[in-house]
Structures are given as C-alpha cells and as structure tokens.
Amino acid sequence: MKITKSKKRWGIILLLLAILIGQTFYPLKPQEPIQYYERDSGQMKTEKVVGEKWLIWLYYNPFGEATLWTLAKRKVVSSIYGNMMDRSSSAKKIQPFIEDYNIDMSIVQEKGFDNFNAFFTRKLKDDARPIDTSFNIVVSPADGKILAYADISKSDFIIKGYRFDVFSFLDNPDLAQKYHDGALLIMRLAPVDYHRFHFPISGGLSPNVKINGNYYSVNPLALRKKAEIFCLNKREYTILSNSLFGDVIMAEVGATMVGSIEQTFKGNVANKGDEKGYFKFGGSTIVLLFQKNIIQIDEDLLINTAKGYETTVKMGERIGIKK
C-alpha cells in the first residue's frame, strides 16, 4: 500500500493530538500484569511489555479507544510505523532494545543491521533451534507464548463465555465446519521474539489465502477488552496436508504496527522446520487448527491454558503428538 506524504502527516498529527488530549484528561489506569509459564523451568513469569503504556491508553482510555476505532486499527498507521523501521535512522534503536529486553544475540546469524526491521526479522544460526523430526510429532512453528485448546467447541477463549469463532476466522463456512470441534493452538509473538515462522509438520501445501482485516493489537491487554480480535484482523492461511495429520491449517495474523506478513517459502511441499515466512515490525500470531481427534496436545500446555496462562515455546520443540 502506497502511503502519501499527506496521509502520513495527518495520520501522525491526529494520533499525537489524541494522545496528548487523552493523557491530559484521562490518566492511565494500571492493568493486571501479563503472567505466563516459562516451559523450561515451570515457573510463573511476568512479561515486560513493549509499548505497554501505549496499549493501555488505546484499549482502556476513552480518547485512546476513539483513536483505536478511527486510526490505530487501520493499515495506514501500521504502514507509517513499518516504513519508519525501514529507515537507516531506526538502527539507533537496536542496541537499546537488545539491552532493555535481554535478547540473546549469540544465536543470531548476522550482527550488523542497516535498520530496525533488518534486526527484527533476523535469522538464527542453523543449530539455534533443534527440530524434533519424529514423524508423529508436531513442533512449534515459532518462538513465543502459546495457548492450547483440545476442543474449541467446548473451550472458553481468553474471556469466560467467549469461544473462538472458526467460521469468522476462516471466512469459509465449508472449510470451517471441518474444524469447529477440532484443536486450536495460538502462538503469540511479542516484539522481542524471533519473528520468522516455520512449518510444524511436513506435507503438501495449498495456495495461500488472504483475508483482509484490521490491525488491532494481539497482546493480552487488548484481548481482555476485545476477544474477537483474531477474527477481525488481517490474516493469511495455508492448508498443510500429510497422511498422518490430515489437513492442518496454519494461519498468520497481522496486528498493530506489523508492517507486513512476508511469505518466503516457494513450492508446494514443505519439510517440518522449513521457514515459511516472517513478520516485519510488531508482535503477531500464528494459529494452527487440527481436525477432531488428530492431535494430542502436550499436557502442560493444556493445563496452563485452562488456568488462563500462556506457556513459552521455542520454534522446533514438541507441542503435540498424533493421537
């Protein structure tokens, strides 16, 4: 999408004006921290959220909410910020970001970056994320925090009483019917995470399907206020098929400040662990859908989700097995 200088100027002016007015008359109210389970240690941790004050202002402040509905959810705002992260001047943000969020650079292929997006879409060394190659194992397609549901027709999602609407999400009633009582795995990639995504199983690939939508944040601070975000945001999906797991849907969901979703894989057959693509600047989400009685999701992920908490996962590690 081409953003004109006039749109950029007015978008920035209106956003800054709304922030100034909102913060002056409606001070930010603290929200419950985002807590999650660290899978390796089993310990509960508290997430340090990138842009936390901004998110709270957008979703919990009257002026922020008005800005969200009129500006922040739109492509133009995310495109403006994404373009800024492509500029050479954005490189000065890299080192402070690394230090603030304790990012492990020892596993990164390259160390020098021309701009923030080059750092954000960094590649890891080949041995940084071992892939469980067992044919009956499903691995995490990304680094991030996961929510897991064995049967989405019977599981509350984020907010008590709200169920994930697979029909709205896929925008295809016939296809959605196959997954309405299946398993759902959601991997949230925060801005501090490795932002390339990979195939969780091997198999043949359908053509990529794109669904237009908005650019709401996928952070839990936003989901607590508006649980249907995944069904409103821009998203893309591919059907990954093999003889053991059948047809598995892998979807990528855009979010606020995600410059774009880039699909890098070429061809119609993929091996588990192959790179599928990457997100430019911003946090975002990978969604996996399995048909009923196909996958046995790892118990720790199900237990933590039932308690209302995400669990950290690394790309390539086991998250389930053939049922």
Image (spheres, grey):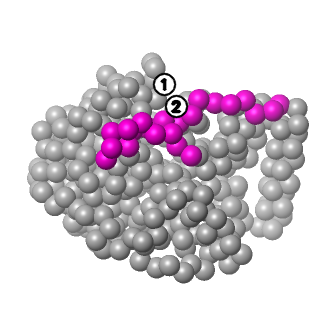
- Separation of residues labelled 1 and 2 (CA atoms): 7 Å
Asked if 309 appears above or below 202 in the picture, the reply is: above
Q: Which is the main secondary structure of the residues drawn in magenta?
A: loop
- Residue 177 in view of the camera: no
In the figure, is residue 146 to the left or right of 199? right
Residues in magenta, as a range = 26-48
Question: Residue 163: x and y, percent?
Answer: 41, 26
- Residue that carries the numbered disc 2 in the rendered image: 227
Amino acid residing under circle 2 = Ala
Q: Residues within 10 Å of mark 1 (few under 14, many from 20)?
A: some
Label 1 or label 2, whichever comes before in sequence order: 1
Give the residue displayed 62% in from the left and 75% down from the top. Answer: 115
Contact (CB < 8 A) between labels 1 and 2? yes
Of residue 191 and residue 172, the one placed in the foreground of this image is: 191
Amino acid residing under circle 1 = Ile
Give the residue displayed 39% in from the left and 55% down from the top. Answer: 143
Q: Residues within 10 Å of mark 2 (few under 14, many from 20)?
A: some
- Residue that carries the numbered disc 1 in the rendered image: 159
Of residue 234 and residue 115, the one placed in the foreground of this image is: 115
Question: Does residue 28 show up magenta in the picture?
Answer: yes
Task: Name the image quarter holding the C terminus.
Answer: top left
Question: Does residue 122 show up magenta in the picture?
Answer: no
Question: Residue 156: x and y, percent?
Answer: 39, 24
Task: Name the image quarter holding the N terminus.
Answer: bottom right
